[in-house]
Amino acid sequence: SPAAPGPLGRGPWGPSALWPPGIPRGDPPGIPGTPPGTPGVKKSDFYKKTIFVGQSVSYSGNAIFNTLSHISKSKKIELPVFEEVQLGLSTGLALNGFIPVTCFPRFDFLILAMNQLVNHLDKMRSLSNNSFKPRVIIRTSIGSKKPLNGGVQHTQDYTKIFKNILTEINVVSLKNPKDIFKEFKFALNRKDSKSTLLIENGDYYNSKWLTI
């Protein structure tokens, strides 16, 4: 049977098992969620805190993988299919000063992380009296229907539902190629350090987004 968990950061189940190579341990400048421009925080240090987590961020398996091909492997954490844990892990990274870009290949799969999303990340400021302000960038995509329809369990658009249920997380539907970099940049740099859910559309990867 597996060994019992040890102290934080030690043992087979500690965070060190998932800590990406090449990323320094230790406390970041300032408090978690500190935006660039804060005294003592360099912009370069701020961007170094970004980290990409999820399914097929390191290995091919979905359309999002190709958009991350230029990202160093040292800034990626490949995860198995456990959406609830993924979002909880992402929140934990953010509370430790990182800026996780957590990728869910299809919008339908993000439903499996609703507890961590709605009851934890979205309520963190209220629960902590604004003491904790984790910045998580959640990236997902509405499943494509062309050239092959993935079926009703893989192609739904839940944007309106998520906008209604989330109170602290900004929900953005990306429909125009010109908005992509602008919205990602805003999510990364916003002064209030709020988390952002960015919703892409799988049918655009081979059509309008191809011309970017």
Image (cartoon, grey):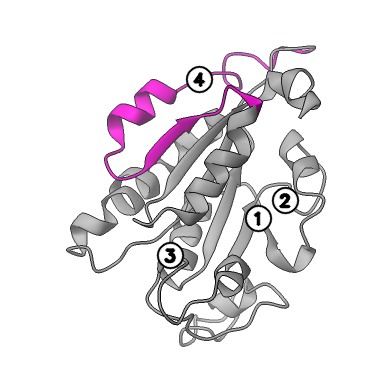
Q: Amino acid at mark 1?
A: Leu
Q: Is the Cβ of the residue at disc 1 closer than 8 Å to that at disc 2? A: yes
Q: Which mark is residue 35?
A: 3
Q: Secondary structure at mark 2?
A: loop
In the rendered image, which quarter contains the N terminus?
bottom right
CA gap between label 1 and label 4 equals 24 Å
Of mark 1 and mark 2, the one earlier in the sequence is 2
Q: Which mark is residue 157?
A: 4
**Which residue is painted at 75% across and 36% down in the image?**
62
Q: Amino acid at mark 3?
A: Pro
Asked whether residue 29 is in view, the answer is yes
Q: Which residue is mark 2?
A: 57
Of mark 4 and mark 3, the one earlier in the sequence is 3
Answer left or right for 51 relative to 169: right
Q: Amino acid at mark 4?
A: Asp
Of mark 3 and mark 1, the one earlier in the sequence is 3
Q: Nearer the viewer, mark 2 or mark 3?
A: 3
Q: Is the Cβ of the residue at disc 2 closer than 8 Å to that at disc 3? A: no
CA gap between label 3 and label 1 equals 27 Å
Q: Amino acid at mark 2?
A: Val
Instruction: Say few, some or many: other residues with alpha carbon within 10 Å of mark 2 (under 14 / 14 to 19 / 20 or more).
Output: many
Q: Which residue is mark 1?
A: 79
Q: Is the Cβ of the residue at disc 2 closer than 8 Å to that at disc 4? A: no
> Percent x, y for residue 81?
62, 46
In the image, residue 171 sits, relative to residue 75, either above or below, namely above
* Residue 56 falls inside the magenta stretch: no
